[in-house]
Amino acid sequence: MARPRQISDARILEVARTVFLSEGAGVSTTTIADRIGISQSVLFQRFGTKEGLLIAALAPDRDMSWLELIRRGPDQREIAVQLMELARAITGAFRQMLPALTVLRQAGLDLHDIVREGEAPAPIALHLELTTWFRRAQRQGRIRRGDHAAMALAFQGALQIKPYLSYVVETPVGEEEIAYLRSVVEAFWWGLSVDRLAAAESGDTEPVCPPGC
């Protein structure tokens, strides 16, 4: 009977990710193995090479569940509310991805090296899904017509810059980030709202971001 594994792959990857993120791509597999309490040979048996371990530990989640949120929408709720929901999910995902992708690049790995054949790297997949989301919203008549790819890229860029700057200057994430996301959503909602021109032409009050956005 085969001897059961005492240390799961999930545990190995959890520790390896922590070590890579704290010490960089140059850390030795011996150091990682010692931290886990296994031999270096076990690491190679499980993941083949150090590069294989790096990819397994640091590549964005294969499921990328945050993309499913984009794929399901827009639903019947207020567009601004959904944009805020997307903003929180995308910012959180990018905050997790950024340190890992930085270490992978230190190791000389291109984003295309860490995805399955036929898949797009996470930032590109995000742009493609957001583009489709904005196109669907336009077809529903719920946002203004325009270049949906440009809308998606602008929205994505606005969401990525905050965690990027926080990572570069090592500032903590707090309520200020939520306020920033709300401001971004309000600006986009104002620019995309099909009610804006009608309100302006009728002399009504400018549309206000609804509760929840």
Image (cartoon, grey):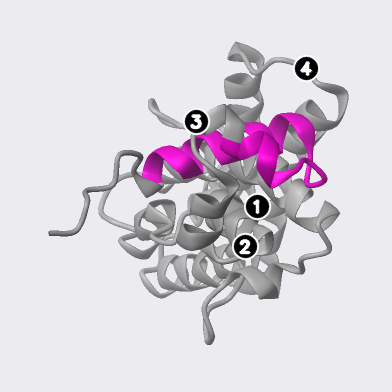
**Residue 24 lies in the magenta stretch:** yes
Return the residue found at the far left.
1
**Which is more toward the observer, 198 or 34?**
34
Tag in front: 3 or 4 = 3
Residue drawn at x 53%, y 34% as measured from the top left: 15
Q: Secondary structure at mark 4?
A: loop
Whole-angstrom CA distance, mark 3 to mark 1, is 44 Å
Return the residue found at the far bottom.
118
Whole-angstrom CA distance, mark 1 to mark 2, is 5 Å
Q: How would you rate the neighbour count of disc 3 (Cα within 10 Å): few for under 14, some for 14-19, many for 20 or more?
A: few
Q: Secondary structure at mark 2?
A: helix
**Mark linked to residue 152:** 2
Task: Name the residue type under label 1.
Answer: Phe
Contact? badges 1 and 2 (CB < 8 Å): yes
In the image: residue 196, left or right of residue 75: right
Task: Name the residue type under label 2.
Answer: Ala
**Which is more toward the observer, 29 or 151?**
29
Residue drawn at x 68%, y 74% as measured from the top left: 113
In the image: residue 75, left or right of residue 23: left
Residue range highlighted in magenta:
10-33
Instruction: Give the mark nearest the N terminus, 2 or 3.
Output: 3
Can I make out residue 44 in this image? yes
The residue at which mark 4 appears reads as 171
Can I make out residue 81 in this image? no
* Image coordinates for residue 114, horizontal then vertical, percent: 62, 68
Whole-angstrom CA distance, mark 3 to mark 4, is 33 Å
Whole-angstrom CA distance, mark 1 to mark 4, is 22 Å
The residue at which mark 3 appears reads as 37
Instruction: Give the mark nearest the N terminus, 1 or 4.
Output: 1
* Image coordinates for residue 167, horizontal then vertical, percent: 77, 30
